[in-house]
Amino acid sequence: MKIRFVGGASTVTGSCFYIELNKLKFLVECGMHQGNGSDSVNRRAFPFAPDELDFIFITHAHLDHSGMLPRVMKDGFKGRIFCTSATCDLLEPMLYDSASIQQSDAEWLTRKGLRSGLPPVEPLYGAADVENLLPLFEVTPYDKVVHLAPGLKCRFIDAGHILGSSTLELWFQDGPVEKKIVFSGDIGKKGNPIIKDPLSPGKADFLVMESTYGDRAHKPMAASIDELVAAIKTTFKRGGNVYIPAFAVGRTQDLLYILNSLVREGRLYRIDVYLDSPLAEEATKVYLAHPECFDEQARKFFTTKNTDSSVRLHFVKTAEESMRLNRLRSGNIIIAGSGMCEGGRIRHHLKHNLWRPECSFIFVGYQAKGSLGRRIVNGAKTVSVLGEDIAVKASIYTINGFSAHADRAELIEWLSAFEDSPEVFLVHGEEDAANSLGLLVREKFGFVTHHPSDGETAEL
């Protein structure tokens, strides 16, 4: 088996691993790059022939693991795409939303370029490409071993990251011996709201493992919730609104669950929460359609009806409705995408409110290097938003305890469940995080570790 690290090595976006096994060729993940300069990276030619791929595995629905699927199909892929049921249901609205963004961005760049005599910009892919992609999905239940071809079988187990997220186990024939490679996907932390805790495969010869938070610890969930409550109350006393840039899938649903729990517990009153993301609304509906993924606490929560002790939730559908939110001056929570402030409606809220000292922006997810969100949380005094320099006067909070990723200690705990000594390839993490985690893994377990770079090939 040969594995080429096409994306997601030494970075947290664009996960994509190209594998050759005998005559088979396939991908694990097909992610989109995000952050500064990502458009040119996403438009590069693939270092493999999409029409030669037999199948693709997707561990979960976040676009940094799945967002290039329509482009691969557009460039000739006609095979099968394996994922869990909830992942498949989430991917449909997510990829249509991504196609819409690609289209609008291309139109904006075309209008801008025409003034300089540049040719029109084509979108990376469109809605028709997503429509053509959907029949290729093959839903695979958790814990079921699927025989894909002679000498190759797979199984998905729950990764506890977002709804439907999985760790992928692949057994392959290496001469007379069967070996196993595991792709961790994004490993969730224990106690994440709504979904079950992550499982460990227990055995592997090779392991491709994420390292997003390999060099740091999360604040405990209880302390993070205390910080959230304090930030909301302080902001409302100042006469401002709270704005939360949030990923439409996963973080938004967790926040709504937490805010409702706080109202039920009497720690917050019945506040107005505006969900300014049509994609997040669709994703929330998918969450509610998959109670089989819920943990026991969430199942009890969702079967207890008590509308008098819930937030007043408003779904903001149109762009006009979103713009009207700027008339709300205080006492509201607005949740909008994207989580790293690289796109979506949050940019308009930043433009109109980041300069207001009475307001607050609460960051509850990872901010990739080069992203607008990263510049804000790093303390920039001014940032460029939609072509305009905006002063950062609002209060900025970073609450990393809401992250859906395992932290350093939890990654080590997940690894400690392995009964053997897998050879470990650390991916999906910036260089410092991967190096720090690799050092700890070698010291604690004695495992061989690698930190592959993009484009590197390993022969297993």
Image: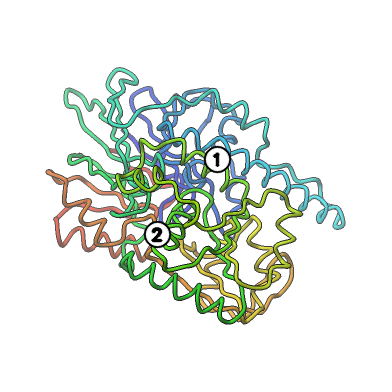
Q: Is residue 323 visible?
A: yes
Number of other residues with Cα within 10 Å of mark 2, as a class: few under 14, some 14 to 19, many 20 or more:
many
Q: Residue at x 63, y 47 (%)?
A: 278
Q: Amino acid at mark 2?
A: Ser
Q: Is residue 37 visible?
A: no
> For residue 176, what is the image quadrant?
top left
Camera-near label (2 vs 1) is 2
Is 212 placed left or right of 63 in the picture?
left
Is 399 placed left or right of 248 in the picture?
left
Does residue 211 sit above or below 218 in this rendering?
above
Q: Residue at x 17, y 26 (%)?
A: 177
Q: Residue at x 25, y 29 (%)?
A: 171
Task: Classify the position of the N terminus by image quarter.
Answer: top left
Is 432 placed left or right of 101 in the picture?
left
Q: Secondary structure at mark 2?
A: loop
Does residue 287 sit above or below 193 in this rendering?
above
**What mark, if any, has residue 313 been given in the picture?**
none
Q: Residue tagged by mark 1? A: 68
Q: Residue at x 72, y 64 (%)?
A: 386
Q: Secondary structure at mark 1?
A: loop
Circle nearer the N terminus (2, 1): 1
Does residue 104 sit above or below 219 in this rendering?
above
Q: Residue tagged by mark 2? A: 403
Q: CA distance from mark 2 to mark 1?
A: 24 Å
Depth check, front residue: 455 or 301: 301
